[in-house]
Amino acid sequence: MRVNTSLMKITPSRVNTFMFFKLPLGWWSGMRVKSLTDTTSVVHIKHKWINQNPFKSMFWAAQGMAAEMSTGVLVMQEIEKSKRKVSMLVTHQNGDFFKKATGKILFTCNGGNKIREAIEASIETNEGQVIILTSEGVNVNGVVVSNFQFQWSLKVKN
């Protein structure tokens, strides 16, 4: 099955189905888009055998994958809304870890407006734009376990 994101209305259910076919590691890890609005996305992932590290917590890369998805799904949504072809690429990433990630972790990104402004600027200037989106990982007790920043390069294609 081929899934063309340029023709796909971006919803949590459709992104999760897309993930099964195009990002199987994310799907098998238990990562799922929980909610998506114009400005915010929430992705959850639960600590389990397939994404654990030897220290009885979630492997840092599994956390990073969920954090990136929380930023990327917002980028995909804004591209779909723009009705333009836009290249998207993570060009830099940084992460900080504060507590062991066990149980269910929610990664939240609130960068929808920043993405929209970057796409509009790329349309106006015909130049690529660079933005930094942050995703915060919180456990069920509301404790921040990790925080990631992703630098995205966005350029409208002619």
Image: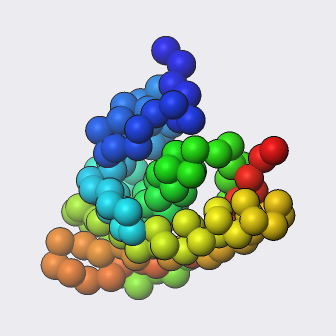
Q: Residue at x 26, y 83 (%)?
A: 143
Q: Say which of 49 and 155 sits in front.
A: 155
Scheme of colours in the image: rainbow
Residue 117 in view = yes
Which of the 4 image quadrants contains residue 27? top left
Q: Residue at x 69, y 49 (%)?
A: 86
Q: Say which of 63 and 56 sits in front.
A: 63
Q: Say which of 100 and 84 sits in front.
A: 84
Residue 46 in view = no
Residue 13 image position (x, y, % from top left): 29, 38
Q: Say which of 103 and 31 sits in front.
A: 31
Q: Tell me: residue 132, above or below residue 55.
A: below
Q: Residue at x 64, y 62 (%)?
A: 119
- Residue that sits furthest to the front in the current view: 124
Q: Tell me: residue 131, above or below residue 59.
A: below
Which of the 4 image quadrants contains residue 66? bottom left
Looking at the image, residue 65 sits to the left or right of residue 126; the answer is: left
Q: Tell me: residue 45, above or below residue 150.
A: above
Q: Tell me: residue 19, above or below residue 55.
A: above
Residue 30 image position (x, y, % from top left): 32, 45
Figure quadrant of the C terminus: top right
Residue 80 image position (x, y, % from top left): 52, 45
Which of the 4 image quadrants contains residue 85? top right
